[in-house]
């Protein structure tokens, strides 16, 4: 069964450092997302990406965040200067189309900022 | 208006019992209501979803009941099993102008043998 894969599974970084979280969406999917889940809290939308550009972003997704699809398979989330409050589980998701709204989630990257 | 309220926060059910999780929303523009199941250390996985043109959808032991006038929907898990122990999230989306999911706060379900 096709799946969304994320690397690394756990990333520890010092405050102020840049991190890049990587995702390989399902191959025929066109819509890509990042969500985050702070420990014990709900899953929150960060950004959606379609046709090589951001289609929507939340207020959480400020100038410190960026997304990129550097090649035909990877989808990355970069946090330029990490803060303690960026510690969370980050989930990548993808869906086939805007009308087929079943989003498939990866297993997540746990980001710990120290 | 964009919130989805979920209850209860946690639920303990005996094996074979019925688990019921409720969600409520305010924004009548929502037109897609999925339920996600999340096991520890894993990402959310779609369990079942409904659109507001039907009042109920059943897949195996899982049923969504949808009440459009009350702006509420619920997940019923019949014959609950220990393997159903997980966190369940309801969500909502406005599919015609956005594709983001608005998640509820989650319900931690524990099914004891």
Image (cartoon, coloured by chain):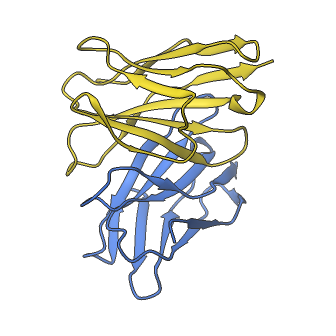
Residue at position x 21%, y 32% in the image: A51
Q: Quadrant of the N terminus of chain A?
A: top left
Quadrant for residue B59, please give it.
Answer: bottom left
Residue at position x 51%, y 45% in the image: B37
Q: Quadrant of the C terminus of chain A?
A: top right
Please state which of residues A69 and A23 is positioned toward the viewer in this rendering. Answer: A69
Q: Position of residue B72 (x, y in %)?
A: 49, 77
Residue at position x 72%, y 16% in the image: A16
Position of B17 with respect to A46 (left or right) is right
Please state which of residues B111 and B96 is positioned toward the viewer in this rendering. Answer: B96
Count the marks: 0
Q: Colour of chain A?
A: yellow
Q: Position of residue B6 (x, y in %)?
A: 61, 65
Q: Is residue A18 above or below residue B97?
A: above
Q: Position of residue B78 (x, y in %)?
A: 50, 62
Q: Is residue A80 above or below residue B76?
A: above
């Amino acid at each position: 069964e096709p799946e969304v894969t994320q690397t690394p599974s756990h990333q520890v970084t010092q405050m102020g450092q840049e991190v890049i979280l990587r995702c390989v969406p399902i191959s025929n999917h066109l819509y890509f997302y990042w969500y985050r889940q702070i420990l014990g809290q709900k899953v929150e939308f960060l950004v959606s990406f379609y046709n090589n550009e951001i289609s929507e972003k939340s207020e959480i997704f400020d100038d410190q965040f960026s997304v990129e699809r550097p090649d035909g398979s990877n989808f990355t989330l970069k946090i330029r200067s990490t803060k303690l409050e960026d510690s969370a589980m980050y989930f990548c998701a993808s869906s086939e189309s805007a009308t087929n709204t079943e989003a498939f989630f990866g297993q997540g990257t746990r980001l710990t900022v120290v | 208006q964009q919130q989805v309220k979920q209850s209860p926060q946690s639920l303990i059910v005996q094996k074979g019992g019925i688990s019921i999780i409720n969600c409520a929303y305010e924004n009548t523009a929502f037109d897609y209501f999925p339920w996600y199941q999340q096991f520890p250390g894993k990402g959310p996985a779609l369990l079942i979803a409904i659109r507001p043109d039907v009042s109920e959808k059943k897949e195996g032991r899982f049923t969504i009941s949808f009440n459009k006038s009350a702006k509420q929907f619920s997940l019923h898990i019949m014959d609950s099993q220990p393997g159903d122990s997980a966190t369940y999230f309801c969500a909502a989306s406005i599919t015609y102008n956005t594709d983001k999911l608005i998640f509820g706060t989650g319900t931690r379900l524990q099914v004891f043998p």
